[in-house]
Image (cartoon, rainbow, N blue to C red):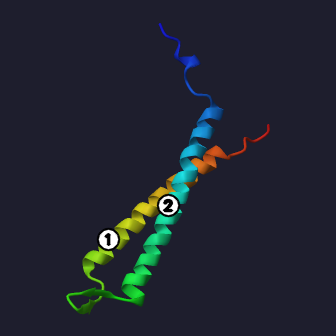
């Protein structure tokens, strides 16, 4: 039989993998939140959308889309937080 214990990643490599996944995910989440907020401000608050020569306000589809995207961003932020917490967690001394 193949001894899989030699090929399984140790605790340090799991932490490195968690850090390599957590940092880009955290940065992507922050960038997504910033761009979503900036686009919302520019398109709906500062200068409303101009369609067919008429300025339109928010529709229900826009509100549902923004709520869905923010929900996904919050979940991704939590996942990145947990990955980074695992990667940089100190073990307690006995």
**Relative to residue 9, is residue 45 drawn left or right?**
left
Q: Quadrant of residue 52?
A: bottom left
In the displayed structure, would residue 15 be above or below residue 22?
Answer: above
Determine the residue positioned at 57% across, 39% down: 17
Number of marks in picture: 2
What residue is pinned by disc 2? Answer: 29
Closer to the camera in the image, 35 or 52: 52
Mark 1 nearby-residue class (10 Å; few <14, some 14–19, many ≥20): few
Q: Residue farthest to the front?
A: 53
Q: Residue farthest to the bottom?
A: 54
Residue 50 lies, in percent from the top left, at 28, 87
Residue 65 lies, in percent from the top left, at 32, 71
Closer to the camera in the image, 36 or 47: 47
**Residue 65 bears which disc, if any?**
1
Q: Residue farthest to the top?
A: 1
Q: Determine the CA span between mark 2 and mark 1.
A: 17 Å
Determine the residue positioned at 44% across, 62% down: 73
Mark 2 nearby-residue class (10 Å; few <14, some 14–19, many ≥20): many
**Relative to residue 92, is residue 38 drawn left or right?**
left
Closer to the camera in the image, 51 or 24: 51
Return the disc, 2 or 1, that comes first in the chain's sequence.
Answer: 2
Determine the residue positioned at 43% across, 72% down: 36
Q: Quadrant of residue 70?
A: bottom left
In the displayed structure, would residue 1 be above or below residue 93?
Answer: above
């Amino acid at each position: 039989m193949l001894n899989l214990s030699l090929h399984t990643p140790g605790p340090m490599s799991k932490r490195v993998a968690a850090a390599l996944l957590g940092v880009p995910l955290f940065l992507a989440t922050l960038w997504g939140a910033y761009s979503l907020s900036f686009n919302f401000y520019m398109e709906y608050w500062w200068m409303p959308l101009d369609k067919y020569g008429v300025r339109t306000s928010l529709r229900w589809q826009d509100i549902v889309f923004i709520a869905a995207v923010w929900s996904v961003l919050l979940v991704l932020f939590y996942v990145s937080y947990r990955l980074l917490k695992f990667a940089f967690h100190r073990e307690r001394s006995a």
